[in-house]
Image (tube, rainbow, N blue to C red):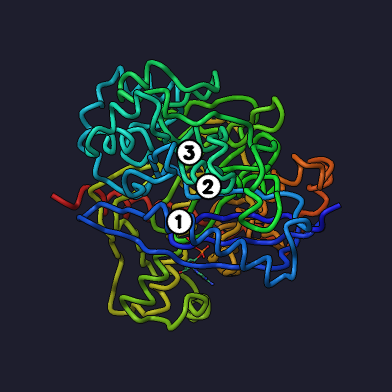
């Protein structure tokens, strides 16, 4: 039996290769950043070759650091930045354009034009998504429109489209396998999440040739093996999931109603809705969590654009603290927020508001306001935004939460976690390993090759670090004032 699983974690700004052992613990990591290209305001690109070279380096490097060979690796799992769009030539394996990153807004006007009620309803019904430049479909359209001859070549079957998982799978297998998993496919806006097929009607709307699409597979199966030239032996690639879905699995939120929130740069809340697609009436996304065997798990998702980044703002722009963790001590210098509310609408507001025209807003300042009040208001902003998404999920799903599983950099902040518990009335559960995104893909890959026998075995590996219970303090005033502050932040940009 091979000793380890490797997760290939292809993030937006850096890529990592992480070695997990049978206990689900991290034993070694290699990480490297890669270049971000901003050719115009609102445009974000990556160099596909650099994505691959960086990832290849981290895999070789982590093997070397661990003193392990390909034979020691039972399987590779892939988790990735989602929606980011690549198109390459199937013969040469060369991309025909830079990757258009999920944050890229160049197709916003094109998406606006699609937004008549009937099309919005049809797209939400089939894909679970709201029409937006965020998803892959309009980005594929853009590449086919802007690279000479691309449409014709795509129709002739010469080009391949893929999200980052597909691209890495293609490169890892030496160009042998062109596939993706259902969780990534569900973020393209051309995939029908009910039938689990690319949707002809949507392909027609975006004029995307079917010949360029990857085969869609489950999230846990052997897709292919690494080219032996790469790492000195063949390793099966056996798990794929988009980053947020992978984190949901890593958190072992495997039963309907279980929710995780990742407190990173933004906050990403995902609820497992089991075999049912819940169509949101409040602008959450319905998406595929994963497929294992024939079993498909769906999820509801709400993304908050500014989460931990509010702490970065206080650190880098206002110089309140030297490092992010110091915010906790600063916030503890005061009893409460002193009437201060801080709405971090810096880039507009995400779920559940979707207001592109808000800005950041601090309100309730008086002569008595101290730094500590603002620090406290910032932490409350993370918790209050998360509360809005949880409440919206409860409205859409009819499921009342009891517990919220947390991960991400800012989940280390105990005061924040206590505030989150007080404001939502939920028990907050922080696992020992908060690298749940990478862990999820490792679990999916390990399950496929029998490294772990069952979900139950994996469940037994998942362990709690700390829980936070609601203190029972009255938070109604804080919630009411937050809501008033958010209203004032909205529609500020003219
Ligand atoms: P990402 O994966 O999005 O880069 P991470 O999960 O690494 O994010 O989390 C980093 C974010 O969390 C940063 O925005 C940082 O400001 C914030 N952060 C890190 N530690 C703390 C802390 N102790 N308290 C509050 N925020 C924190």
Q: Is residue 482 left or right of residue 471?
A: left
SS class of the residue under badge 1? helix
The structure residue drawn at horizontal position 39% and vertical position 66%, both measured from the top left corner, is 310
Calculate the distance from the C-alpha at mark 1 to the C-alpha at mark 3. Answer: 36 Å
Residue extending furthest toward the right? 1
Which element carries disc 2, helix, strand or loop? Answer: helix
| Circle 1 or circle 3, nearest the eye | 1
Residue 241 x, y percent position in the rendering = 58, 42
Q: Residue under label 3, please give it.
A: 392
| Quadrant hosting residue 181 | top right
Which residue occupies the extreme bottom position in the image? 322
Q: Earlier in the sequence, mark 1 or mark 2?
A: 1
Q: Are marks 2 and 3 in contact (CB under 8 Å)?
A: no
Q: Position of residue 294 (x, y in %)?
A: 70, 25
Q: Nearer the viewer, residue 371 or 291?
A: 291
- Which of these two is toward me, 331 or 69? 69
Which badge, 1 or 3, comes first in the chain's sequence?
Answer: 1
Residue 450 visible here: yes
Q: Which mark is residue 171?
A: 2
Q: Quadrant of residue 93?
A: top left
The foreground one among 53 and 287 is 53
**216 left or right of 370?**
right
Is residue 345 toward the left or the right of residue 67 in the image?
left
SS category of the residue bearing label 3: helix
Would the CB of label 1 be found within 8 Å of ligand 1?
A: no
Count of numbered circles in the view: 3
**Residue drawn 79% across the image and 48% down it:** 458
Which residue position holds label 1? 51
């Amino acid at each position: 039996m091979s000793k380890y699983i490797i997760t290939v974690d292809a993030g937006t700004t850096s890529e990592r290769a992480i070695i997990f052992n049978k206990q689900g613990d991290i034993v070694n990591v290699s990480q490297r950043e890669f270049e971000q290209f901003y050719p115009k305001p609102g445009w974000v690109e990556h160099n596909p070759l650099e994505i691959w070279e960086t990832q290849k380096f981290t895999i070789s490097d982590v093997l070397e650091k661990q003193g392990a060979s390909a034979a020691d690796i039972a399987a590779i799992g892939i988790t990735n930045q989602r929606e980011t769009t690549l198109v390459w030539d199937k013969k040469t394996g060369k991309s025909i354009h830079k990757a258009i990153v999920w944050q890229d807004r160049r197709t916003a006007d094109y998406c606006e034009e699609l937004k008549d009620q009937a099309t919005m309803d049809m797209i939400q019904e089939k894909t679970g998504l709201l029409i937006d430049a965020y998803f892959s479909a309009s980005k594929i359209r853009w590449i086919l429109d802007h690279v000479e001859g691309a449409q014709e070549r795509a129709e002739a079957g010469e080009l391949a489209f893929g999200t980052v998982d597909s691209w890495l799978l293609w490169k890892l297998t030496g160009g042998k396998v062109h596939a993706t998993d259902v969780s990534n496919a569900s973020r393209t806006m051309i995939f029908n999440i009910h039938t689990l097929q690319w949707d002809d009607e949507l392909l027609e709307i975006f004029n995307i040739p079917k010949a360029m699409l990857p085969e869609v597979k489950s999230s846990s199966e052997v897709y292919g093996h690494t080219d032996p030239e790469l790492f000195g032996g063949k390793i099966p690639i056996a798990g794929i999931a988009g980053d947020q879905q992978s984190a949901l699995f890593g958190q072992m939120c495997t039963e309907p109603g279980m929710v995780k929130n990742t407190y990173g740069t933004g906050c990403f809340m995902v609820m497992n809705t089991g075999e049912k697609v819940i169509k949101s009436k409040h602008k959450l996304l319905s998406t595929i969590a994963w497929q294992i065997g024939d079993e498909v798990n769906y999820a509801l998702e709400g993304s908050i654009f500014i989460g931990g980044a509010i702490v970065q703002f206080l650190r880098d722009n206002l110089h309140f603290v030297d490092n992010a963790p110091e915010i906790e001590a600063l916030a503890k210098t005061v009893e409460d927020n002193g009437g201060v509310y801080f709405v971090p609408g810096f880039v507009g507001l995400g779920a559940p508001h979707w207001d592109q025209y808000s800005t950041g807003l601090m309100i309730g300042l008086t002569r008595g306001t101290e730094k500590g009040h603002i620090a406290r208001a910032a932490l409350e902003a993370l918790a209050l935004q998360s509360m809005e998404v949880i409440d919206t999920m409860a409205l859409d799903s009819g499921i009342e939460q009891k517990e919220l599983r947390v991960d991400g950099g800012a989940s280390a902040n105990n005061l924040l976690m206590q505030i989150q518990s007080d404001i939502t009335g939920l028990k907050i559960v922080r696992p020992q390993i908060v690298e749940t995104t990478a862990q999820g893909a490792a679990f999916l890959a390990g399950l496929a090759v029998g490294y772990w026998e069952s979900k139950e075995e994996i469940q037994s590996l998942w362990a709690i670090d700390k829980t936070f219970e609601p203190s029972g303090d009255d938070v109604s005033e804080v919630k009411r004032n937050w809501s008033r502050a958010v209203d004032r932040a909205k529609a500020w940009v003219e």
